[in-house]
Image: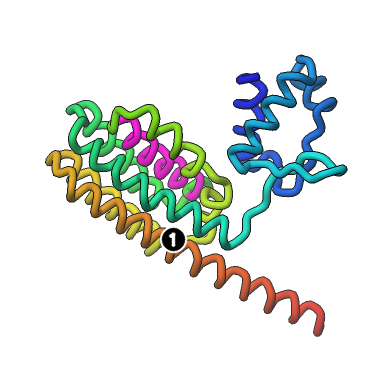
Amino acid sequence: MEFAYDTMRKRILSGQYEPGTQLKEEHLAEELGMSRTPVRAALKKLSDDKLVSVEANRGVFVAGWTRWDIEEMFSLRALLEPHAAKLAAEHATDSDITRLNQINAEMANAIKSRSDDAVLRIQAANRAFHMHLLDCAKSQRLKSMLVTLIDMPVITRSFFLYSAPDFARSLQQHEDIAYAVQTHDGQLACNLMESHIRLSYRRFMKERIDSTVVSDTAARDADAA
């Protein structure tokens, strides 16, 4: 069951399965080379994770995202990640701190490069930073609760909406958090992470609204043409 769950979860979070995609037991079992029983159990677990929705007499579908879903996700991160940052500041080793600084340097280089794959590199560095902080916190339970939230495709894809100043602000916040961890100031790390998540939420919602307005305007112009 774990193989089926891990495989489908990664495909959903990476966007390989788009929202609304139907996941059929028989097809998945054949594709993954197993019986339908572990596939069914994996789909049940994905439903518990709110990554898929089960519709009576229709089947299992990859979940979409409403504004409420997004607000809840950010609220949960704002509650949990500051605590993770506090634990990271208290438990991080010298090698942990070195790695945090390396990740921030990678993000800075990606921002400066302006290459075709810059956004993908920034996205990867952002994920690596947040995931490594969870490793520094030394709490497997906390990590298991946050991994899915950090990996949500609705968030990772939002990087393609960000401007250069947005990336610069995000990097500065990461560097401030890394400094708090380096100085083992747990409360500072906690406060900085809470601000980072809340600012990310505001920026995320603004970019989504702006993007929607542009799309709607373009659609109306096309209809009028």
Its colouring scheme is: rainbow
Q: Which residue is at 66% across, 38% downward? A: 47
Q: Principal SS element in the magenta part?
A: helix
The image position of residue 32, as x and y in percent, is: 74, 20
Residue at image x 20%, y 30%?
91
Residue 10 placed where, x, y %?
60, 32
Q: Quadrant of residue 103?
A: top left
**Count of marks, rendered view:** 1
Residue 99 versus residue 108: which sits nearer the camera?
99
Q: Is residue 145 left or right of residue 18?
A: left
Span highlighted in magenta in the image: 119-135
Residue 219 coordinates in the image, percent (x, y): 74, 75
Q: Nearer the viewer, residue 48 or 74?
A: 48
Q: Residue furthest bottom?
A: 224
Q: Is residue 4 magenta?
A: no
Residue beneath label 1, please?
Answer: 201
Crowding around mark 1 (Cα neighbors within 10 Å: few <14, some 14 to 19, many 20+) is: some
**Compared with residue 37, is residue 166 higher up or lower down, i.e. above or below?**
below
> Which residue sits furthest front?
56
- Seen at 51% across and 39% down, the residue is 148
Which residue extends farthest top? 34
Residue 153: x %, y % from top left: 57, 46
Q: If the image is split into quadrants, where does the C terminus sit?
A: bottom right
Quadrant holding the N terminus: top right
User: Residue 133 magenta-drawn?
Assistant: yes
- Quarter of the image for residue 93 reads top left
Above or below — where is 28 with respect to 178? above
Question: Residue shown at 54%/57% (left/top)?
Answer: 70
